Image (tube, coloured by chain):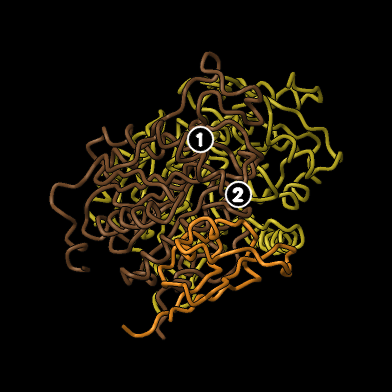
């Protein structure tokens, strides 16, 4: 018998603290599988956010830095400039990246910083108790938009991938989802491309991953995956918004 | 015949795996695990094709899948 | 030993490069911008990295990453910019990261102006950011001292794994003075804790979160032991004509330079007055000041602010002597004649208007 599916070495094995059915755990695994398959666990440095995944450093079996809220792209820039030969990535939620960290992510992309960003978009603040996020859909109820996000007073959600793909410095930008196995497989391909692009020197790469938040959406985990498909995907279309001209060299070598 | 192993003490009873098994053989067990959840389990293991959909969908890396050497 | 005429801001840059700093993350703000201008050229010459960030908030976090990756790194700004960096500075203290942070102070509060000031003393020495942390804060009063203290700052930052601040002001940054540039043998300590990629070793972590209170208290207690050691080992000051002084002036940086002029003129009138110039603002020279003040009848604190260091002077004297104050605000400079007038008042047994 041969194992076809097991815990990737780049995960420490410590059980995740996430709520039952929260798909952060799937995304952690996809990143870890990618790092294993590219053989870069010992030459990768991760930068974690503030938010539900603030403890990602406990789950990842590689060098890590814990950044202040929204500043992971700046921290990652500092790391990458000191170790240009190493692989550097950030893992951030939508509050971290699209609210307080907007300037950092925009300028990291504009600079074409050779880092990879895993951007988890669950359209809400999880850790702090279900508040309105920049990505919360109009009409969506949260603890700070109790009667539904009001476009008049609270504006409309930010489509980060499209926004960043207008920047010349952005090398690879894709939006994926993890709400079912088919999409999980596609998500992993994009994550792998993002890392492979960095390894071949292509500038800034980001994968926006639509993710569920059963607790703060107030839905059963299975309903949450359906809600994501029916509500998030229409507003946040999946796909590749920026692709580097030549296919990533490392990608070809690896396959 | 493919073998699926559930690390019951990592399972939080979220039921996502039960919703994606093409053979519908992944169900929630009657007993509860150390965290007080009903863990997922496989009934009729012989119908398992080793597709690992359950394992891919699991947010807690609780499921391992093995297959014969092809 | 080469002697050169250098501008204060540029001297900081040259000293940093001499000390082995190869990474600078900054943001334009008057009156410190000559430093980034110098660093972008100088670091290119030595194969270093200069990056102008999108904000001071981002710049300090780039320093956090670079320091955590094992580099000697510096950032500089002026008053409002330092306010934006305070969260990052607190994180660096919490994660125990070495870095040199330069504040070329300007008039405040708010946008204030670009004139020299000393109104960030509290910000620099009493925390500024959140949580129990301290920074060694060194205050030069000449371009030569700028060079010497900047070099020391990098060694102290690595020795204690803690940020160190150089606190200057617009005058010191913009003025030019002869500087002796001495050959420097740099030995940057090994940093096995840095995130360089966990090749053949356990992963390293740069972090300041301790979600459970017990380990967080333990972490804080360890930091406090370090901060006390930093305080014991780094008190620096200059005594000027204090041996027979009956009146004591306490001032640092540019104010101290001006006060020396007033002291010399007062001495010509037979007034026995001297100066203690704190060079380390943290750790503040409490014991030394208390000792020198025993022999005097009055103490005059001179600052380019509404009076901040004066609180530490009072702490040092613990009520044993009257402490008077003379200060100029909003970027105005105290001039020698004004300080001399205050000294003369004290000499006549009156109190200065303060």
> For residue A14, what is the image quadrant?
bottom right
Image side of residue B22 versus residue A199, left or right: right
Circle nearer the viewer, 2 or 1: 1
Residue ID for mark 2: C280
Across and down, in percent, residue C74 comes to 42, 49
**Tally of marks:** 2
Chain of the residue under label 2: C
Residue sitting at x 64%, y 50%: C134
Res. A100 mark: 1
Across and down, in percent, residue C238 comes to 60, 48
Q: In this rendering, does residue C160 appear at all?
A: yes
**Quadrant of image for the C terminus of chain A:** bottom left
> For residue C337, what is the image quadrant?
top right
- The chain coloured brown carries which letter? A
Chain C display color: yellow
Do tag 2 and tag 1 residues touch (Cβ < 8 Å)? no
Residue A10 against residue A21 in the figure, above or below: below
Using a 10 Å C-alpha cutoff, classify the residue at mark 2 as few (fewer than 14 neighbours), some (14 to 19) or many (20 or more).
many
Residue sitting at x 42%, y 72%: B50
Across and down, in percent, residue C123 comes to 62, 37
Chain B display color: orange
> For residue C344, what is the image quadrant?
top right
Res. A246 mark: none
Q: Secondary structure at mark 2?
A: strand
Chain of the residue under label 1: A
Q: Secondary structure at mark 1?
A: helix
């Amino acid at each position: 018998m041969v194992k076809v599916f097991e815990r990737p070495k780049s995960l420490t094995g410590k059980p995740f603290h996430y709520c039952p059915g929260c798909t952060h755990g799937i995304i952690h695994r996809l990143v870890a599988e990618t790092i294993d398959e590219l053989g870069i666990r010992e030459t990768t440095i991760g930068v974690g956010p503030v938010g539900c995944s603030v403890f990602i450093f406990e789950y990842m079996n590689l060098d890590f830095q814990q950044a202040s809220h929204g500043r992971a792209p700046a921290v990652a820039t500092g790391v990458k400039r000191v170790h240009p030969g190493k692989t550097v990535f950030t893992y951030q939620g939508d509050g971290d990246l699209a609210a307080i960290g907007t300037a950092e992510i925009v300028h990291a992309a504009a600079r074409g910083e050779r880092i990879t960003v895993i951007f988890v978009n669950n359209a809400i603040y999880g850790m702090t108790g279900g508040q309105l996020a920049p990505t919360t859909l109009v009409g969506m109820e949260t603890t700070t938009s109790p009667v539904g996000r009001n476009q008049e007073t609270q504006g409309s959600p930010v489509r980060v991938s499209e926004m960043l793909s207008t920047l010349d410095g952005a090398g690879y930008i894709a939006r994926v989802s993890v709400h079912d196995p088919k999409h999980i497989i596609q998500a992993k391909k994009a994550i792998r491309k993002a890392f492979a692009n960095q390894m071949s020197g292509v500038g800034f790469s980001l994968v926006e991953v639509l993710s569920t938040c059963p607790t703060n959406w107030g839905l059963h985990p299975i309903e949450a995956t359906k809600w994501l498909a029916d509500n998030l995907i229409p507003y946040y279309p999946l796909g590749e918004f920026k692709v580097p001209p030549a296919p990533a060299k490392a990608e070809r070598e690896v396959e | 015949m493919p073998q699926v192993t559930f690390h019951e003490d990592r399972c939080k009873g979220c039921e996502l795996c039960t919703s994606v098994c093409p053979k519908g053989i992944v169900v929630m067990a009657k007993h509860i695990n150390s965290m007080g959840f009903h863990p997922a389990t496989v009934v009729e293991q012989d119908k398992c094709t080793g597709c690992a959909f359950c394992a891919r969908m699991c947010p807690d890396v609780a499921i391992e899948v093995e297959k014969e050497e092809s | 030993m080469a002697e050169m005429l250098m501008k204060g801001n540029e001297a900081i840059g040259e000293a940093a490069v001499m000390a082995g700093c190869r990474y600078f993350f900054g943001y334009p703000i008057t009156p410190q911008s000559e430093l980034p201008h110098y660093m972008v050229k100088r670091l290119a010459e030595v194969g270093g990295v200069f990056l102008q960030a999108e904000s001071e908030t981002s710049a300090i976090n780039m320093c956090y990453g670079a320091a955590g990756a094992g580099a000697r790194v510096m950032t500089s700004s002026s008053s409002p910019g330092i306010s934006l960096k305070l969260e990052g500075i607190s994180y660096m203290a919490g994660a125990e990261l070495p870095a040199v942070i330069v504040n070329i102070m300007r008039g405040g509060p708010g946008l204030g102006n670009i004139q020299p000031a000393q109104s960030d003393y509290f910000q620099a020495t009493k925390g500024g950011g959140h949580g129990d942390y301290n920074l060694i804060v060194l205050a030069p009063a000449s371009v030569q001292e700028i060079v010497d203290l900047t070099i020391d700052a990098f060694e102290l930052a690595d020795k204690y794994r803690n940020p160190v601040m150089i606190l200057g002001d617009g005058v010191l940054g913009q003025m030019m003075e002869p500087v002796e540039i001495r050959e420097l043998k740099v030995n940057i300590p090994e940093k096995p804790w840095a995130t360089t990629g966990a090749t053949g070793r356990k992963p390293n972590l740069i972090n300041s979160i301790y979600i459970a209170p017990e380990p967080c208290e333990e972490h804080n207690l360890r930091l406090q032991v370090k901060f006390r050691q930093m305080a014991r080992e780094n008190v620096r000051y200059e005594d000027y004509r204090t041996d027979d002084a009956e009146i004591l002036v306490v001032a640092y940086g540019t104010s101290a330079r001006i006060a020396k002029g007033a002291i010399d003129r007062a001495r010509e009138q037979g007034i026995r007055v001297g100066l203690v110039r704190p060079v380390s603002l943290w750790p503040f020279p409490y014991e030394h000041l208390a000792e020198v003040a025993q022999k005097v009848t009055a103490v005059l604190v001179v600052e380019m602010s509404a009076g901040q260091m004066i609180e530490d002077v009072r702490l040092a004297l613990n009520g044993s002597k009257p402490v008077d104050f003379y200060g100029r605000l909003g970027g105005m400079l105290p001039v020698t004649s004004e300080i001399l007038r205050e000294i003369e008042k004290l000499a006549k047994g009156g109190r200065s208007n303060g």
